């Protein structure tokens, strides 16, 4: 397991969670869970502090990026757990297929009104960007297993830069 890949997955999950908590309606189930865990006051305080900054963010960051970051995190997590070694390749592909089917299926289910929520093509696009970024990182990681730390770091920096550029270009998709 690559520690950098695991850290990237955890960071993406954390940032996606913060964006989700700060910008979503309190009618969602997760806010009841926070209350049951005794975290209502902390969550509300975070929402109050983050509220002035939300208006500075484009809509795609507030509404589409959290889901894409969670999906990205999940893809990297599966790669950390199983990787694509010959002995685990079928497990890895099965989990990726189910996870991707669920992520894309939930969005498409909203289009057909089988799933509550509102279909958004930007959400679907961001899922594809997240899949591409996770695939690039996993591919680079597999190729650089025997390379030195510096070479891996340079490759990760380039990949991260590409992901940031893609996200910045996504601002043109703003709602």
Image (cartoon, helix red, strand yellow):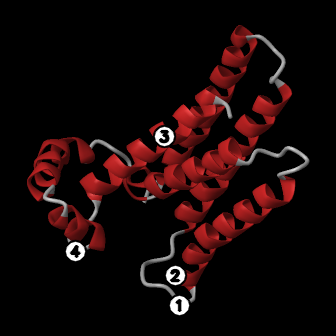
Q: Where does residue 75 sit, x and y in percent of width and height? A: 64, 51
State how far apart marks 2 and 3 are (Cα). Answer: 27 Å
In the image, 103: left or right of 134?
left
Q: Which residue is mark 4?
A: 27
Residue 25 visible: no
In the image, 70: left or right of 85?
left
Q: Earlier in the sequence, mark 4 or mark 3?
A: 3
- For image coordinates 85% across by 60% down, the residue present is 90
Residue 80 visible: yes
Q: Which residue is mark 3?
A: 10
State how far apart marks 1 and 4 are (Cα). Answer: 20 Å
Pointer 4 with pointer 3, Cβ within 8 A:
no
Alpha-carbon neighbours of circle 3 within 10 Å: few (<14), some, or many (≥20)?
some
Q: Which residue is mark 2?
A: 110
Q: Where does residue 50 sit, x and y in percent of width and height? A: 19, 44
Q: Which quarter of the figure is the C terminus placed in?
A: bottom left
State how far apart marks 4 and 3 are (Cα). Answer: 26 Å
- Rendering quarter of residue 71: bottom right
Between 165 and 18, the one lying in front of the other is: 18
Q: Nearer the viewer, mark 3 or mark 1?
A: 3
């Amino acid at each position: 397991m690559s520690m950098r890949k695991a850290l990237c997955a955890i960071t993406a999950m954390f940032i996606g969670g913060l964006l989700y908590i700060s910008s979503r309606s309190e009618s969602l189930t997760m806010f009841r869970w926070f209350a049951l865990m005794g975290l209502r006051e902390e969550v509300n305080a975070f929402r109050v502090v983050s509220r002035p900054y939300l208006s500075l963010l484009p809509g795609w960051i507030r509404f589409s990026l959290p889901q894409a970051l969670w999906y990205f995190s999940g893809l990297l997590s599966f790669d950390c757990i199983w990787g694509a070694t010959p002995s685990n390749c079928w497990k890895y592909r099965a989990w990726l297929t189910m996870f991707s089917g669920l992520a894309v299926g939930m969005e498409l289910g909203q289009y057909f009104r089988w799933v509550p929520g509102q279909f958004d093509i930007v959400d679907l696009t961001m899922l594809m960007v997240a899949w591409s970024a996770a695939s690039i990182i996993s591919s680079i990681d597999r190729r650089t297993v025997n390379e030195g730390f510096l070479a891996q770091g340079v490759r990760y920096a380039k990949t991260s830069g590409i992901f940031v550029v893609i996200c910045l270009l996504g601002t043109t998709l703003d709602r």
